[in-house]
Structures are given as C-alpha cells and as structure tokens.
Amino acid sequence: MDKMMVLMIVGMGIVTYIPRMLPFVVFNGGKMPPFLQGVLKNVPYATLGALIIPGILLINKDIWFGFVGFLSALIAAWLGANVIIVILTAITALSVYSFFM
C-alpha cells in the first residue's frame, strides 16, 4: 500500500476517535448538565426529521406514501417511543399502505 494511503487511514481513525473519546475525558464519569442531556436526547429526532421531511416533499409518484410514513412516525414519536420503534412504525405503516394500494 502507498505510504500516503496509510497516513490517510491513520488520520481518519484519529479524527473519528477524538469525538468519541472527548466526552469521557471532559465529563470524567460525572453527570452531564440537565440542559445538555435534554439537547442530546432530542438529537435523534431532529436528525430523523431532517432526513425524512425532504424525502416526503420530493416523492414523485405517490405523495400520500410520504405523508403516511411521516404521520405514523410523528404519532409514534409524540407518544414517546424509542427512535428505533418510530422507524419500525413508519416502515410497517408503509408496508401496509403499499400492500393495499
């Protein structure tokens, strides 16, 4: 392998390692402030929304397909379900919708 390629792989490893290890070093086993806990708790839902909303608006064939998935995910998230459950709920609702349409 080329020396530049090895250095690039090592560099990428270091860059991905730092954000994973930094919280352990900064908080040193202590509790995070409540505000930071609240922000981090909502990150998966914000990310999910950022990924799903553009997809709903850009569907060309059946716009209702996007709205069914969005509404089912929204209801599951509003009821306080885990992010994985929210995704599985949307997938199940879309599977049922596509079976009957």
Image (spheres, helix red, strand yellow):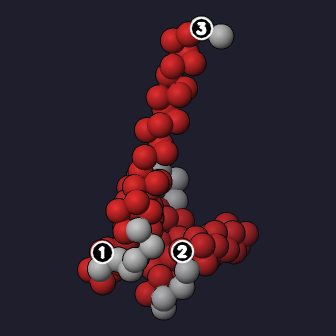
Q: Residue at x 43, y 87 (%)?
A: 78
Q: Residue at x 56, y 10 (%)?
A: 3
**1 vs 2, front mark:** 1
Horizontal side, residue 22 vs residue 5: left or right: left
Dot 3: element = loop
Dot 1: element = helix
Q: Which residue is mark 3?
A: 2
From the viewer's perspective, is residue 31 above or below residue 53? below
Horizontal side, residue 75 vs residue 54: left or right: right
Q: Residues within 10 Å of mark 3 (few under 14, many from 20)?
A: few
Sequence-wise, the earlier of marks 1 and 2 is 1
Q: Which dot marks residue 36?
A: 1
Sequence-wise, the earlier of marks 2 and 3 is 3
Horizontal side, residue 29 vs residue 35: left or right: right
Instruction: Name the quadrant containing residue 28.
Output: bottom left
Instruction: Name the quadrant containing residue 88.
Output: bottom right
